[in-house]
Image (tube, rainbow, N blue to C red):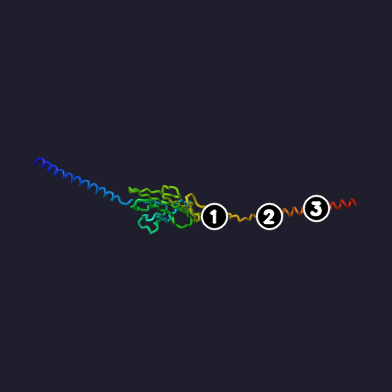
Amino acid sequence: MCVTMSKKRCLIRQRVPVILLTLICLVGTLSVSVSNAHAAGPVQVTFTVKQQFINKSISAPPSEVFTYQLSPQTPDAPMPQGSGMQAHRFSVKGTSDVDIGPISFSTPGLYVYTLSCTTPDMPNYSKNRKMYTIEVHISNESEASVIYLGEDAKAEELAFEHIYSDNNPPGKLNPSGGGVNRPNLPVAGPKTGDFSNPALWTSLIALSSVLLMVIILIGRRLGLSSKQTRGRKE
């Protein structure tokens, strides 16, 4: 009996270190997984804005600096470093690309921004005033999905095309970017119920006067002929 008890105690003593080692390994694995989850950190997103000038003159290609504005439409939406309270303003020179960001997103959700050109009208330039809507979707798995919308249609990139011409007055492109707006032409005002036409009435009065003169002449001739006929009878 004593031998049996001693054997059991020996087995328990041998198994205790194994059990403790197993528990230590499990705790270590959990701590590593938790630390990796925190190590992932916020999701960073960068927007690339493309500016292009279409040169329709014989002069050198334009290299003007145009300004743009990225405005948050979602409350508490993260912004690039150096942004103002309401918007992030930046400049692009000539035909080139500019990266905006990175912007750090730490909370899952939908974040909406708008992007537009804010440069005032300039001689010889026709600007593209298209406004883009940017949607950033952050999933619970810390994955980012970005969608660009231009005039309610998906866009592949954030691109602004501006036209430069020596004979081009200050103006702007159509919102779709398809061309320059034509100058304003005279537009007929709304009808007020007065459909008079002075030229038509003048013509009618002149025609009526001529017809009246013809009738008077015919009447006189008929009167003279009737008198002559009576005189012959007498």
> Mark 2 and mark 3: span between their CA atoms?
27 Å
Q: Pick whichever, 95 or 210, lies toward us.
A: 210
The residue wearing badge 3 is 219
* Circle 3: element type: helix
Which of label 1 and label 2 is nearer to you?
Answer: 2
Residue at horizontal 24 percent and vertical 47 percent from the top: 30
Quick one: SS at disc 2? helix
- Residues at discs 1 and 3 in contact (Cβ within 8 Å): no
**What label sits on residue 201 in the rendered view?**
2
Callout 1: SS = loop
Q: Dot 1, how many residues are within 10 Å of its Cα: few (below 14), some (14-19), or many (20+)? A: few
Q: Nearer the viewer, residue 82 or 85?
A: 85
Say which residue appears at 30% left-offset and 50% top-offset: 40
**Mark on residue 11?**
none
Residue 83 percent location from the top left of the image: 37, 57
Q: Residue furthest bottom?
A: 85
The picture places residue 189, in percent across and down from the top left corner, at 58, 55
In the foreground, 42 or 10: 10
Q: In the rendered image, is residue 65 in sight?
A: no
Q: Position of residue 45 (x, y in %)?
A: 35, 51
Can residue 230 be seen in the rendering of this structure?
A: yes
Residue, disc 1: 184
